[in-house]
Each structure stands twice: as structure tokens, then as C-alpha cells.
Image (cartoon, helix red, strand yellow):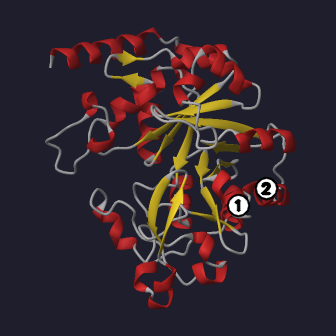
């Protein structure tokens, strides 16, 4: 308890030392898979709710169908996010694949045409943690990337504000090896909807390196190198994310990317706030941190509330502590609550 108390004091001191002008410049708010804390992730309903709650950007994870169409799913394995297991006509599609070195069993988007995927319906991925979202099961289709862009355009016309797109290329190396590369389909669709310049509200993100470097040669759109507290990029098995976050590693990232997307565990450690944001800024990189969620199981121990009947912790305190590190962007499953926490810090 003493250690947690000292850490909390340290975070409060950190927040008090941030210049007022910095505090007033809120980080951009990125709706992680939409408002996925309140609707099944990667559905048009989730994205629309996030926009209505004031998200600056919505984030679709992009995978491909057998006929080369970009669709939004967290993974190409869809057994846990759709009703595919209830479709006997697709029982023989269940298979085992190794993706980025991990063996997975289920149904995969690349084994379905878009028309076949359109017969499925989305379901809540975390039903035990988010039981309220189950009431929306089987209501929504798997959206295509184009449908998401059309939604953004419609909401821009409705609200009069610009809404950003923050797509992630999921397993790009794997998809390229099976003849379904992301790059051409992604850039073509973005171009068709008027996105192509460095100042357009688009960030393209990836945990891999090779596809970002290829994108850098093909587009002026801003790129974000995702990094985690453990492991390394699937396309560079000899490289760790820790290597990439050294001074030299960050300088290398700056040669092809606009910023980094670190996990929150890299910014607030059990010992207190890290120096990563400052090092990244020194390298000329923005920092967009992922993913801030309300549930205790996703929060650092300092911000957990074990006795909360909904299983949720001090989310506002966590958002404010993350913002106090000087990050430029925040991913959250709960954009409405994240916006309220940020606004409370910057009245």
C-alpha cells in the first residue's frame, strides 16, 4: 500500500508540473474499434456512437476477404466476434492456421468472399466483461472499409466537423504472403474518398515495419509504428520493441513514421511514469498511446477498484495520468468517458 501511495503522489506531482498551456492542448481522442466498450467492436453502430461522443478519430482494424475486400475485424479469425459457428454451411471452413507464429483455430476472413461474410452478424468479443453489449449481438453486419468511410462522410455533413480515420493493417506480412496485400487496396480506397496528403486526418498504423516502409514510399499520409511492452515486429524476428525504443531505435522509426503507438504499460510502469514520451518527442515523433479501458482487468493496480460492482476502476484518474505524460493521442474503448476525463483536466 505504501508503494501505491507513493506512486499516486508521484503522478499527482507530475500532473502539477505540466505547463498550463500543455494541459489545455488535449491529446487527440481515438475511438478504439469505435465505442467498443458500449457496442460490439468494429460495427457501424460502434463507430457512429464514438463519433457522437466526440471522438476525433475512429479506428478500424483491417483484414481482407478472399476476393480482396478490406473489412473491419480485430483479427482475421472471426469465431469470437461473429455468429459464424451457428452457420452449418460454413462448418467445413473451420481450420487451424499459424499466423505470425501463433497457432489459431477457427474461421478466417481470407477463406470467405465478401458476399459470404455478409450473411454473418457481429457479436460482443468480451461478453463476460461487457455483458450489456450482448443485447446488440446479431444486429450488425461486418462493415467494409468503404462503408466506414461513407459513414464518416455522412457524419461530417451532419456535424459540420472533420472526423479522422485511423486504420490498422492487421498481419500485413501474412496477408501479403497469401496474395492479399493491404497496401494497394487501402491507398486506393483512401484516395477515392479524398485522402492522400500529409495534413489529411488519417493515420495508418502497424505493428510491423516492412509494410510501413513500403507505405512511406507510396503515400504522404502519416504513419504510426505500433510497439508493445514485450515481443517485437512479426516481420523482424531478430528485433524487439525494446530495441526500437532506444534513442537510436526511435531515430530509425522517425525516418519512416510520424509517430509511435506504445501500450500504456510503457508509459506508466509499476515504478511510475517512464521517460518514453520525452525521448520520442526528442526524436521528432508523436506518441499515441493504447488502449485505455474502464475495466479493472485492464487498469494498472493503482487505478483498480476491486469492490466496484461493475468491475470498473478509476478510469478518469488513469486517463488524466496518461495525459499528464505529454502524449499526443489516446486510444480508448470508451471515448465518451475519456473525453469527459480530459475535459475535467482542462476546463
Residue 330 horizontal/vertical position (percent)? 52, 36
Disc 1 element? helix
Instruction: Answer left or right for 181 relative to 296.
Output: right
Q: Residues within 10 Å of mark 1 (few under 14, many from 20)?
A: some
User: For the point 58% across and 43% down, which residue is it?
Assistant: 234
Q: Quadrant of residue 327?
A: top right
Q: Residues within 10 Å of mark 2 (few under 14, many from 20)?
A: some
Kindly identify which residue carries mark 1. Answer: 149
Kindly identify which residue carries mark 2. Answer: 190
From mark 2 to mark 1, how far is it between C-alphas?
8 Å
Instruction: Answer left or right for 337 relative to 9.
Output: right
User: For the point 61% across and 19% down, which residue is it?
Assistant: 280
Residue 302 horizontal/vertical position (percent)? 26, 27
State the residue lying farthest toward the front.
Answer: 238
Q: Quadrant of the N terminus?
A: top left
Instruction: Answer left or right for 325 relative to 163.
Output: left
State the residue lying farthest toward the bottom.
Answer: 89
Disc 2 element? helix
Q: Is residue 19 above or below residue 215?
A: above
For the residue pair 48 and 99, the one nearer the viewer reads as: 99
Dot 2 and dot 1 residues touching (CB under 8 Å): yes
User: For the point 64% across and 47% down, which residue is it?
Assistant: 166
Residue 99 horizontal/vertical position (percent)? 54, 56
Amino acid at each position: 500500500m505504501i508503494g501505491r501511495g507513493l506512486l499516486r503522489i508521484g503522478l499527482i506531482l507530475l500532473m502539477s508540473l505540466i505547463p498550463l498551456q500543455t494541459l489545455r492542448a488535449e491529446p487527440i481522442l481515438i475511438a478504439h474499434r469505435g465505442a467498443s466498450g458500449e457496442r460490439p467492436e468494429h460495427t457501424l453502430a460502434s463507430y457512429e456512437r464514438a463519433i457522437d461522443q466526440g471522438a476525433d478519430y475512429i479506428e478500424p482494424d483491417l483484414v481482407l476477404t478472399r476476393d480482396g475486400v478490406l473489412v473491419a475485424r480485430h483479427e482475421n479469425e472471426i469465431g469470437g466476434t461473429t455468429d459464424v459457428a451457428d452457420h452449418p454451411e460454413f462448418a467445413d471452413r473451420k481450420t487451424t492456421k499459424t499466423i505470425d507464429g501463433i497457432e489459431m483455430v477457427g474461421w478466417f476472413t481470407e477463406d470467405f468472399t465478401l458476399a459470404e461474410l455478409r450473411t454473418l452478424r457481429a457479436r460482443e468479443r468480451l461478453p463476460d466483461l461487457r455483458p450489456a453489449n450482448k443485447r446488440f449481438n446479431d444486429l450488425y453486419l461486418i462493415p467494409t472499409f468503404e462503408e466506414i468511410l461513407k459513414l464518416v462522410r455522412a457524419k461530417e455533413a451532419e456535424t459540420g466537423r472533420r472526423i479522422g480515420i485511423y486504420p490498422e493493417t492487421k498481419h500485413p506480412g501474412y496477408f501479403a504472403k497469401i496474395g492479399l496485400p493491404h497496401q494497394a487496396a487501402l491507398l486506393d480506397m483512401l484516395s477515392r474518398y479524398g485522402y492522400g496528403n500529409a495534413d489529411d486526418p488519417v493515420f495508418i498504423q502497424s505493428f510491423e515495419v516492412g509494410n510501413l516502409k513500403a507505405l512511406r514510399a507510396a503515400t504522404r499520409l502519416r504513419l504510426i509504428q505500433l510497439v508493445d511492452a514485450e515481443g517485437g515486429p512479426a516481420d523482424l524476428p531478430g528485433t524487439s520493441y525494446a530495441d526500437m525504443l532506444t534513442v537510436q531505435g526511435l531515430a530509425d522509426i522517425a525516418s519512416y513514421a510520424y509517430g509511435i503507438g506504445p501500450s500504456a504499460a510503457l508509459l506508466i510502469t509499476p515504478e511510475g511514469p517512464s521517460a518514453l514520451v520525452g525521448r520520442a518527442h526528442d526524436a521528432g515523433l508523436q506518441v499515441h498511446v493504447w488502449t485505455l479501458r474502464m475495466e479493472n482487468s485492464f487498469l494498472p493496480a493503482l487505478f483498480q477498484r476491486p469492490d466496484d460492482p461493475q468491475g470498473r476502476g478509476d478510469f478518469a484518474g488513469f486517463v488524466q495520468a496518461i495525459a499528464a505524460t505529454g502524449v499526443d493521442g489516446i486510444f480508448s474503448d470508451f471515448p465518451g468517458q475519456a473525453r469527459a476525463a480530459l475535459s475535467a483536466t482542462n476546463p
